[in-house]
Image: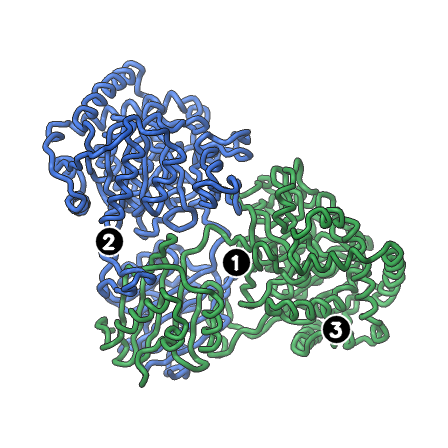
Chain colours: A green, B blue
Amino acid sequence: MRTDPPPGLLAAVRAYERALGTDDLDALDRLFAPGPQTLRGDAGGLLVGHDEIAAFRGARGGAPERRLVEVHVRTADDDHALVVAVTELLRGGRGQQTQLWERTAEGWVVAAAHVHAPAPAFDPRVWRVLGDPLVTGSADGPLARRTVAVKDLYAVAGQRVGVGNPTWLDGADVEPAHAPAVARLLTAGADVRGIARTDELAYSLAGTNTHTGAPPNPRAPGRVPGGSSSGSAAAVALGQADVGLGTDTGGSVRVPASYQGLYGVRTTHGAVPTTGVVPLAPSFDTVGWLTRDADLLAAVGDVLLPPDLAAGTWSPRLLVSPDLLALAQDDVAARVGAFAAAAGATASDAWRTVDVDAWAEVFRVRQAWEAWRAHGAWVRAHPGALGSDVAGRFAVASRVDDATGGAAGERRDAIRAQVLDLLGDDVLVVPAAASVAPRPVPAELEAVRAATLRLTCVAGLGGLPAVVLPTRHEAGSTSHAPEGGALPEPGRRAPFPVGACLLAAPGRDRALLALARELAARL
Amino acid sequence: MRTDPPPGLLAAVRAYERALGTDDLDALDRLFAPGPQTLRGDAGGLLVGHDEIAAFRGARGGAPERRLVEVHVRTADDDHALVVAVTELLRGGRGQQTQLWERTAEGWVVAAAHVHAPAPAFDPRVWRVLGDPLVTGSADGPLARRTVAVKDLYAVAGQRVGVGNPTWLDGADVEPAHAPAVARLLTAGADVRGIARTDELAYSLAGTNTHTGAPPNPRAPGRVPGGSSSGSAAAVALGQADVGLGTDTGGSVRVPASYQGLYGVRTTHGAVPTTGVVPLAPSFDTVGWLTRDADLLAAVGDVLLPPDLAAGTWSPRLLVSPDLLALAQDDVAARVGAFAAAAGATASDAWRTVDVDAWAEVFRVRQAWEAWRAHGAWVRAHPGALGSDVAGRFAVASRVDDATGGAAGERRDAIRAQVLDLLGDDVLVVPAAASVAPRPVPAELEAVRAATLRLTCVAGLGGLPAVVLPTRHEAGSTSHAPEGGALPEPGRRAPFPVGACLLAAPGRDRALLALARELAARL
């Protein structure tokens, strides 16, 4: 391939560097090919089309100052050339930029760009503290050398707990002992890789945090990761930890699992001690975790869970409720419905008469009342300390009086009985969330939260265990598969993840995890 | 640009994925274009030429299992097409691969590839513990919010000291207080970003570590970073910290500064307390630090250093010794010589008669004797705990008897007087190291160490302050410069860094740092 630059190409590359330096958006827009085929990829994901790229550039507020220290040109023909540049950033580190340039009637334009900037020491949207490891587990055990991202609600000996809020962290003491859930993982041989970010006081399903930003969602670039176990989930999705230890009150494990294509479990209420974990709403709070595969999800359960209440053989029916499916967006309902069908689930009308709006309201009111009892004094004493979304939720919570909170508790008990009756000893397949991961737009997040709570409140109110599995979508086979190298259809975008959620009776956690393993292997 | 794949292209892409999955090196070699023009870049740097790429592939032992989840094709003409793929790794995370394919007589081959794999949580070759921040400094001060990578020899309250060795770390207690140097940086507003790797017990100039690997050298991919302040230096070069706090006994700041194109200072012996720092050879040990610019180097000095011994105006002559220059490789001597000339240095014959081999031997013997006094008991009690390079050095040290060590101390004092006499109140420009960063090949490292010690021992024996500045080389202007966007010559590789070192009389630290600022601004 020729290495001599075609006429005008280097001038265009120089113009591009100048435009980047001055954040001249018009010039940058002109220097990228118009139309829906232009590509730009970096560590945050691949953008397709001139408009997506222009929107990204408009939002980032300029590129870091850099110089090109090497330029290599590979010329395909007089109208097409690849320019590979080694960049050196003034803030330190080297990167690389690969651009396919095309000569058009308007001059040279970039048809495709691949940029990598030097990585930061770590991603502070995902982690607060890290070590190699931060805490070393037992020399051996079933989880030997598995790495754990611990949600910043759990006590880790020698560390403070930050609950996603810098004011809280400033006032926190160093913990003298591990929370039992952390201690059990260490005893089983797992290492604590670090302490992962959480939505403030776990009072959110979005995965955003005013103070530290939203962790990235590698499977849905530009979308939120889901929360509140957002950092634990992102750490697992990014391959930076094997296990994401989280909590689930109203969906804080199930929602990020669904948004990020992970396996996740919310355990039976009370099955795993929440000692040493900062509470949100104790009558709903549970320990949960996320992994990239169903086998490890179950292996962690073997370590953390007590034996199932009902031992012996369990051959549950798999049921799916068209009425509950219909609470999700059409595409989500379709993918969870297809998953349920492939799993052999049969449709059930049993849930038709349930008033999920009323259930969600009971959950919301009781959760708010408990949250205010747990944290109202701290919230009052630290005005302005919380981000507006969580502060707004606490403001609402502060107005739930004891009579209303108590009444909601009674309604919760009645609903729990109804849930247990409807579910029996079967397994119900529901969408893990009502939508795919939404954009980080407050109004959109609030609407999605309300819709998702109608689905997630069932396990919360029932105290049920719930296991999330990612539904599959078409993709290439892996490079190591026997038939390796099958490719997805060129040009097709990978769809955002959708999780299917299995619900069972309280105390069925281990059996439910075993069922999830079986389904994951089969589907 | 067309998006339909030319005939045979997708089959070649599939074949490539299969070959990657089975680590079929022959097939991968065939699928990359032959000759010196083929490109392959990733976070570790840009490889140029089929041979470099094949050598890299042969050494890495296979690629991680992955699948392609998106494939985009942009076709320049029937013989050239760009394939952009989004990859999903089984170990988690997404990456991107951009390949320029060319059709040759032998079929489709890759002419250029740009790969990025998902980043790990952090680079354990550089860091042991990290936080956002790990320790928060004062709210304000001259170093407010500057981030510091602390070499794993310094006490950081609440953390253990690891000295680059896992056995030492296992036996270490949590430190109750910061070393004074760390405390002063915190008081000045700097934050501790984390604890950075060091060569074991600082007894090396290479920047390698048997247990955790060598930190990367972003300016010299594939070469060692220099040590023993290797992690602190790499953190700064990578842009992961602003200040790398290190130590310098026989060159442990100067050598990594030189190899990585950084600014670095070794302070006058005794000027900054080494309390709370694990010693190597106390009569030579000094505190030092590295930065990406001369202004910050001096600003840290303002915080850590006492006032200079001789106040008032200082107008030193800048001298350069052709005899000392000649101790370096030709290219290093040429670049440091050019630097000295540009700085206005004049040649001096004063150092002609110095027997640097004898000086280096005195340094080596006395350092060994002190190192064994400091750590011999621990080394004896932990056989097999050290990597072979450092263990070998301690084995030699164990055989230096007290008479020999004492005599070397007397020789050191005599040489010190001679150095002070030769230097007077002038500034001597010498190469910071005898070579550019060598390959991580034991024999090469040992040869380079011996050559470099002949240069670095002068400051060690004299107790002198020493400031390293990177010598410049041709590169593009920065994207933000007024004339922004000037490009280096296409195809030219960026040379490896070379550092120039300024030596002055003890106690001249602040003035020497000010001179370095002036030279950095002017040259």
x and y percentages locating residue A99 in the rendered image:
35, 71
Q: Mark 3 Cα within 10 Å, few/some/many (few <14, many 20+)? A: some
Mark pair 1, 2: CA separation: 35 Å
Residue occupied by mark 1: B91
User: Where is A1 relative to B291, above or below?
Assistant: below
Question: Are dots 1 and 2 on a single chain?
Answer: yes
Residue B495 - label: 2
Q: Chain of mark 1?
A: B
Question: Are dots 2 and 3 on a single chain?
Answer: no
Residue occupied by mark 3: A345
Mark pair 3, 1: CA separation: 31 Å
The label nearer to you, 3 versus 1, is: 1
User: Where is B232 relative to A224, above or below?
Assistant: above
Amino acid type of the residue tagged 2 in the rendering: Pro
Say which element carries label 2: loop
Q: Residue at (39%, 40%) from the top-left corner?
A: B209
Amino acid type of the residue tagged 1 in the rendering: Arg
x and y percentages locating residue B418 in the rendered image:
18, 23
Q: Is residue A132 visible to the viewer in this orientation of the structure? A: no
x and y percentages locating residue B492 in the rendered image:
22, 61
Q: Is residue A349 left or right of residue B125?
A: right
Q: Mark 1 Cα within 10 Å, few/some/many (few <14, many 20+)? A: some
Say which element carries label 1: loop
Q: Chain of mark 2?
A: B
Question: Are dots 3 and 1 on a single chain?
Answer: no
Q: Is residue A353 left or right of residue A452?
A: right
